[in-house]
Amino acid sequence: MKAREHATPVKRPATTARPPAQRATTVPPTLIPGRQRSALDRVVDLQRTAGNQAVVQLAKKAAAPVAVTPEELSSLTSSVAKAAHDIVGTPAAAGLFGVITAQVNRKKPRATAPKHKDTDPLAGLYTELYSKDTVALLARLSQAQRLEVVNGLLDALIPQLGAADKTTGAVTAPDAPIGNAAAAAAEEPSVSKQITNNCEGGWSHVRRTILATFGALEVGPDAAIGRANAFYDKMVRSELLGVKGSLVHPDMQAALDAASTWITSQPGVDVEAVKAGMGKPGGFWIRPNRNNPLALSEHSFGFAIDLNAPMNPNIGKKGGLDAVKDATGVDPATQEDDGLDAAGVQKVAATLHQASADYVAVMSEPARFTARVRQIADGVRAAEKLKNLDDTGADALSTVLRTGKGAAPPVDAVLTAAFGEVAATDAQKAAAATLVRLAKVWRLANPASGKRPKAATEGTVGSVAANGFLNLQPMLVGGLSGTNAGNLNWLGCSSVHDYMHFELMKGSKPALF
């Protein structure tokens, strides 16, 4: 869209806030009484009155997929189960669960199947999963429906307990789906207490994925349970810097030992200070991945630990960090620790640790907030050769942003308080958008009720602004993640920004069986 032309701004000597000016508006021709309004007219109206963002919102609504009906969901599950039925119990079934979830779990399913020969035992399944109709239907599924489809497929494909051939041990898919509750009740007496005592929601809640992960589609549930029992019997009690925690895999404990060794070997180290805010190493809990419910979390296998989860939350895609750069100048999304040694990771963590503390200060102290928004406004004013805001003007701008009704102040009010110009420049509009974003976060962190959000394991915009996102000591993070120390994968520098979470590197994870 062509850039809007603006009248030359009138430079005003006053730098204090003034009452909002009445901005000129034009009545779109499509709003003239008696004229028939088309869909195109509506788009033109939005372009004229609200700009491109409104057009984007309209386009999103127009493109919203039609909800999938229960009948469509049932038909999808049945057709895929039929295509996979005869694969169960064969060597090809070793990859069956992965093939299914790789396509079903995609928000944008692939239209082309992986390369394979016509003689591939999975060829028929590929044909079904990647057919035009299936791809179109998968693209319309919600996350909950994707999970429902996978669970339905596992009910239809996991062989019945005790049904293996007595001589060969061969198994086949059941003739009809087996209900989850009944199957769980039959299996649970054979499952190790090390598993059942550590299942989120009990054995029935995680059994499908556990069995599929340990090969039940190939060898049956009896053998899969035996594999799982043997694996979980290896778990050991975790220990980090002398603090004991939950169960972990022995390989994970070896990484924790390496981290402790590096930290305690640092000259003049105060171990108690390093442990400040750490809490107990925790997380062993057989459960779905919080960011991908169709897979088990790394915690389910003892391959990961969490440290002080509420104060080092999992941000995911909830927008909890969107305003950190605006408030502090540090963008968490650009911080990387890949391939760094412990000292290098420590530096990255120190930057994030300070940004977290600064973010809380800006979003809790009116004076800090005022200073930051003044800096943003004055940056634009200086570039446009306008005088900086004086103290009264800065306070007025801060008041407009922090107080008032609604989730955020009107953009016009912000433009007027920050720049006092009727014809705003592009730079002023961009700064106003930043200021509005900060205002939204302030109001979430400081609600009218006076009750600031509590720290939460799943960080929200408000809880992160009120409590921060990283309180672990930088040396601790360096010791755990550095290549010459624990060499664990820290998800604080990943796309999900899960600051509590440390896990074994992909290439370092041991085989399950």
Image (cartoon, rainbow, N blue to C red):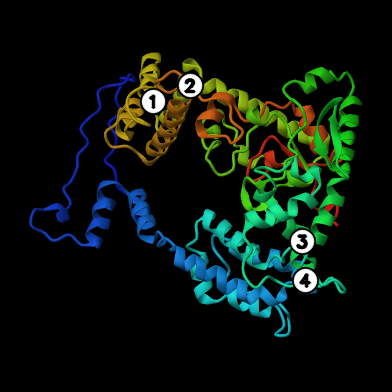
According to the picture, the residue beneath numbered tag 4 turns out to be 171
Residue 294, given in percent of the width and then of the height, sits at: 63, 55
Q: Three-letter amino acid code at disc 4?
A: Val
Mark 1–mark 2 contact, CB under 8 Å?
yes
| Quarter assignment of residue 415 | top left
Looking at the rendering, in which quadrant would you find the C terminus?
bottom right
Residue 407, given in percent of the width and then of the height, sits at: 37, 31
Question: Residue at the spot x=68%, y=57% of the render?
Answer: 183
Ranked by sequence position, the earlier of labels 1 and 3 is 3
- Figure disc tally: 4
Q: Three-letter amino acid code at disc 2?
A: Phe
Residue 356, given in percent of the width and then of the height, sits at: 62, 27
Residue found farthest to the left: 34
According to the picture, the residue beneath numbered tag 3 turns out to be 221
According to the picture, the residue beneath numbered tag 1 turns out to be 401
Instruction: Look at the picture and state if 327 lies above or below 212.
Output: above
Residue found farthest to the bottom: 118
Q: Three-letter amino acid code at disc 3?
A: Pro
**How crowded is the residue under tag 1: few (<14 C-alpha within 10 Å), some, or many (20+)?**
many
Q: Residues under labels 1 and 4: Cα distance?
A: 66 Å
Please identify, in this view, whether the residue under mark 1 or under mark 3 is nearer the observer: 3
Please identify, in this view, whether the residue under mark 2 or under mark 4 is nearer the observer: 4
Question: Residue at the spot x=42%, y=29% of the render?
Answer: 439
